[in-house]
């Protein structure tokens, strides 16, 4: 049953998922807006002045939960990668080349840009911007795309790419598993078991961040396995659960605050439920007329995700360097709501042109080498 469904839907692109993928990147932009307040070398100190960020009283749920866009993206990746590759024998070299073509060129470009900008900042102001542990060793760790593999990754260069580097390990696990026929034939059992096992391990012992990545990736893959069951009824239930979880946190917080925060397991479990609900709802958004009418526009937004994620730190460094060179006070400017709006618009515009003029040509060029061979 699952095999037939997969064959029928293998070329399907989930428009609601594309919208959710873009939203995860926007959440990260909100979370990292705090970087604009890093006007001095504060390495080792946590940012606490959240209420000074623009429109915080209204947007605080987005500011404070934007970092969860990383886990959401991992789950979306699991869903999409399984949809594209999950039920057929995988050509490991082809899969690796496709992933390399999609991820590495922009990573190398932004790493080079950040390294240059940090050197300029150090020459001008005697300190870098935002991330301070920019050693030669860490540069090569970033160059090799393994910045998230260490037990305690340093804050250096284009730091957000740590989450992508972890996903590369999961891609390797995914490809190896699918090279085994018995695993391909029972995907529900495989990915459901991985999800349950990883969740138990994470909550029993302190483990590397790769297990968190595997947890959410396997969640997405498991949801894709049960795609035929995720119809209108599942959407209704998911909407209710998601609504209750949001109400619990932001309206009834004074009464139920201990429910979410009594231990890490509860917090992780709630996040898993929320992300599951978001994915199920997003899958079924494709039924809506307005989604289908704007299909191409939403696909375009989905394509901006990776560039938005990798470009925002270089853009922030450029801003901080320029504003200090001009002698303009930073904080009054970045506290203005118009600055937040301009930042969000600018990042999406830059991501659009980066995808069209750099990412897409690089991806096609690298993949064409594969086809010629």
Image (cartoon, rainbow, N blue to C red):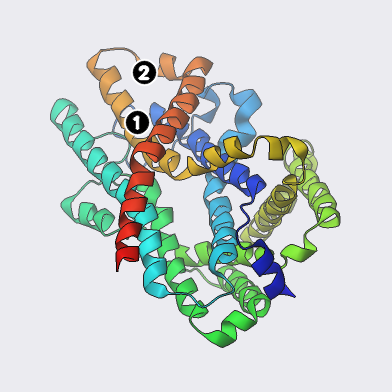
Identify the residue under disc 2: 330
Tell me the element at label 1.
Answer: helix
For marks 2 and 1, the one nearer the N-term is 1
In the rendered image, the quadrant that contains the C terminus is bottom left
Q: Quadrant of residue 219?
A: bottom right
How far, Cα to Cα, is label 2 from label 1? 15 Å
Tell me the element at label 2.
Answer: helix
Q: What is the x, y in percent for residue 250?
A: 73, 37
Q: Residue at x 71, y 56 (%)?
A: 273
Q: What is the x, y in percent for residue 89?
A: 51, 78
In this rendering, position of residue 296 left or right of residue 361? right
Q: Is residue 116 above or below residue 274?
A: above
Q: Is residue 67 above or below residue 42?
A: below
Q: Quadrant of residue 302?
A: top right
Question: Which residue sits furthest bottom?
Answer: 182
- Please identify, in this view, whether the residue under mark 2 or under mark 1 is nearer the observer: 1
Q: What is the x, y in percent for residue 143?
A: 25, 55
In the image, 64 versus 99, the foreground residue is 99
In the rendered image, the quadrant that contains the N terminus is bottom right
Q: What is the x, y in percent for residue 332?
A: 43, 14
Identify the residue under disc 1: 315
Give the class, few, some or many, for how many residues have Cα within 10 Å of label 2's Cα (few <14, many ≥20). some
Question: Which residue sits furthest left?
Answer: 123
In the image, 269 versus 255, the foreground residue is 269
Give the class, few, some or many, for how many residues have Cα within 10 Å of label 1's Cα (few <14, many ≥20). some
Q: Residue at x 26, y 12 (%)?
A: 327
Residue 359 in view (yes/no):
yes
Residue 150 in view (yes/no):
no
In the image, 164 versus 49, the foreground residue is 164
């Amino acid at each position: 049953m699952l095999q037939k469904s997969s064959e029928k839907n293998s070329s399907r692109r989930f428009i609601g998922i594309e919208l959710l993928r873009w939203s995860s990147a926007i959440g990260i932009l909100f979370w990292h807006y705090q970087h604009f307040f890093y006007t001095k070398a504060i390495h080792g100190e946590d940012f606490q002045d959240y209420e000074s960020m623009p429109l915080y009283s209204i947007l605080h749920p987005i500011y404070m939960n934007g970092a969860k866009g990383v886990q959401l993206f991992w789950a979306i990746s699991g869903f999409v990668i399984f949809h594209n590759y999950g039920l057929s024998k995988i050509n490991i070299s082809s899969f690796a080349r496709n992933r390399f073509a999609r991820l590495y060129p922009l990573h190398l470009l932004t790493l080079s840009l950040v390294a240059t900008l940090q050197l300029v900042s150090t020459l001008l102001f005697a300190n870098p911007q935002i991330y301070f542990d920019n050693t030669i060793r860490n540069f090569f760790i970033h160059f090799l795309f393994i910045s998230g593999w260490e037990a305690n990754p340093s804050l250096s260069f284009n730091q957000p790419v740590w989450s992508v580097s972890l996903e590369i390990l999961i891609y390797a696990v995914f490809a190896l598993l699918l090279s085994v026929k018995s695993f391909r034939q029972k995907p529900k059992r495989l990915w459901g078991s991985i999800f349950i096992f990883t969740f138990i391990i994470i909550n029993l012992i302190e483990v590397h961040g790769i297990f968190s990545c595997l947890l959410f990736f396997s969640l997405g893959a498991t949801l894709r396995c049960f795609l035929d069951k995720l119809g209108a009824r599942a959407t209704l239930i998911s909407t209710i659960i998601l609504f209750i979880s949001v109400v619990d946190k932001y309206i009834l917080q004074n009464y139920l605050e201990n429910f979410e925060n009594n231990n890490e397991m509860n917090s992780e479990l709630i996040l898993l439920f929320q992300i599951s609900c978001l994915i199920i709802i997003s899958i079924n958004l494709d039924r809506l007329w307005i989604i289908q009418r704007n299909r191409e526009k939403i696909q375009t937004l989905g394509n901006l995700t990776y560039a938005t994620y990798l470009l925002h730190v270089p853009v922030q460094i450029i801003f901080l360097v320029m504003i200090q060179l001009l002698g303009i006070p930073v904080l009054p400017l970045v506290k203005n709501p118009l600055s937040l709006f301009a930042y969000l618009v600018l990042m999406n515009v830059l991501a659009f042109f980066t995808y069209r003029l750099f990412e897409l040509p690089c991806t096609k060029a690298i993949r064409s080498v594969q086809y010629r061979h």
